[in-house]
Image: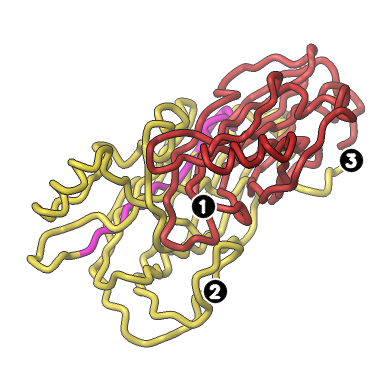
């Protein structure tokens, strides 16, 4: 019996972030998904508390490692969301933007990042590399240095797209650690095989 | 028709001589393959990383193919460029990898190379920040005409990709 849709259940947390040169950070997150996807329950976007890094603890990252024992900002922010869809195209992406305070107490962006939710059920630890846009011209760079207003993306969902990325220059800094438990329902009844090994029917 | 989803991202690059890199990517498939949705080529951002060891692109890939044939399985071809402070692009490497046939998640490393010519051309390119490029980049993923080429090895491009197959089993195809 073929199913008419399949569901994806996402539980997890935005655990912490490690930015070598910044502290006192908070994080906005949102999900971006394709046109065939519907959110059935849970919050599609949210904002964490402001966190101060104090005690050193392990923040081991993958290949782009930046120090094993660091002082991460801990958010421990819960994520519970469920989707349903009829098409794997447009598999949800999580968009993160991290903000901090500058010396005058203004909110300044410290990093944008995007990560595709895992395609396989199970528990996943994801490290999201973060980056900020650089000023497009040296004059704009000087201007932003003088005024203290750093360049930002107009729409943070820009980082989840393919189009228009070639015109941006960015500086990568910092990493956010996300723990995700994925569950899928009716993927196989829908005809999809997304997991090794292939089950013989 | 059987369907294939390629969902993942171009994570970044490492081990190149300089880290200010961007990447031009393209997915190439055989004649029996039809693109239903998604972009099969693109250009990433230029990253000037804080940590010189790793360039971040974090560039999404989401492609939906339908196919009548398992030959001509898609390949991902990359061209890495270095953007210098004057905005000029210098070729830093070519590479390709086959999209895995096994469903599930895969972390792939694409090894890259660039063509080298004579000694004086190398001197020229050292001072002008321009390196020789291939006239026909299709050579990167086709097996013909490689023996005339001299190349030098460059860094690695990191790709993270999830493969979802649909209805392959109905045709008796095991992946």
State which quadrant residue B36 falls in.
top right
Quadrant placement of the N terminus of chain B:
top right
Disc assigned to residue A200: 3
Q: Is residue A50 left or right of residue B18?
A: left
Q: Residue at x 25, y 67 (%)?
A: A49
| Residue on which the image places disc 1 | B19
Question: What whole-number distance in Å separates the C-alpha atoms at marks 2 and 1?
Answer: 22 Å
Q: Position of residue A102 (x, y in %)?
A: 15, 65
Question: At which x and y percent is residue A93?
Answer: 47, 43
User: Horizontally, is A91 left or right of B139 in the view?
Assistant: left
Judging by the rendered image, the residue that carries numbered circle 2 is A60
Q: Label 1: few (<14), some or many (≥20) within 10 Å?
A: many
Q: Nearer the viewer, mark 2 or mark 1?
A: 1
Residue A19, image x, y percentages = 37, 68
Residue A85: in magenta span: yes
Quick check: B57 above or below B140?
A: below
Q: Which residue ends up furthest to the bottom in the rendered image?
A: A55
Q: Provide the chain ID for the residue under circle 1.
A: B
Give me the residue at 71% from left, 19% from top.
Answer: B136
Highlighted magenta segment, given as a residue range: A84-100
Q: Residues within 10 Å of mark 2 (few under 14, many from 20)?
A: some
């Amino acid at each position: 019996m073929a199913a008419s849709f399949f569901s994806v259940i996402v539980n997890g947390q935005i655990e912490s972030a490690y930015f070598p040169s910044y502290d006192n950070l908070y994080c906005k997150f949102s999900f971006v998904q394709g046109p065939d996807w519907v959110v059935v329950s849970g919050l599609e976007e949210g904002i964490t508390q402001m966190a101060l890094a104090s005690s050193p603890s392990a923040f081991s990252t993958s290949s782009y490692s930046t120090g094993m024992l660091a002082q991460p900002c801990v958010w421990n922010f819960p994520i519970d969301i469920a989707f349903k869809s009829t098409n794997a195209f447009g598999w949800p992406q999580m968009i993160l933007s991290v903000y901090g305070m500058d010396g005058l107490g203004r909110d300044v962006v410290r990093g944008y990042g995007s990560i595709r939710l895992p395609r396989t059920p199970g528990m996943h630890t994801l490290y999201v590399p973060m980056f900020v846009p650089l000023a497009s011209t040296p004059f704009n760079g000087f201007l932003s240095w003088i005024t203290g207003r750093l360049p930002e993306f107009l729409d943070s969902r820009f980082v989840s797209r393919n189009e228009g990325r070639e015109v941006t220059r960015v500086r990568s800094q910092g990493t956010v650690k996300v723990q995700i438990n994925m569950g899928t329902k009716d993927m196989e009844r829908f005809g999809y095989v997304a997991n090794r090994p292939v089950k013989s029917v | 028709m059987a369907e294939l989803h390629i969902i993942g991202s171009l994570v970044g690059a490492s081990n190149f001589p300089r880290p200010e890199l961007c990447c031009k990517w393209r997915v190439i498939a055989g004649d029996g393959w039809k693109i239903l949705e998604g972009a099969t080529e693109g250009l990433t951002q230029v990253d000037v990383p804080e940590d010189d060891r790793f360039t971040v692109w974090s560039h999404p890939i989401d492609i939906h193919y339908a196919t009548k044939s398992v030959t001509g399985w898609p390949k991902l071809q990359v061209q890495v460029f270095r953007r210098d402070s004057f905005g000029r692009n210098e070729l830093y490497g070519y590479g390709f990898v086959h999209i895995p046939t096994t469903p599930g998640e895969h972390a792939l490393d694409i090894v890259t190379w660039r063509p080298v010519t004579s000694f004086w051309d190398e001197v020229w390119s050292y001072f002008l920040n321009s390196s020789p490029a291939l006239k026909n980049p299709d050579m990167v993923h086709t097996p013909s005409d490689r023996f005339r080429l001299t190349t030098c090895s460059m860094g690695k491009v990191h790709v993270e990709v999830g493969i979802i197959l649909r209805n392959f089993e109905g045709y008796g195809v095991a992946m």
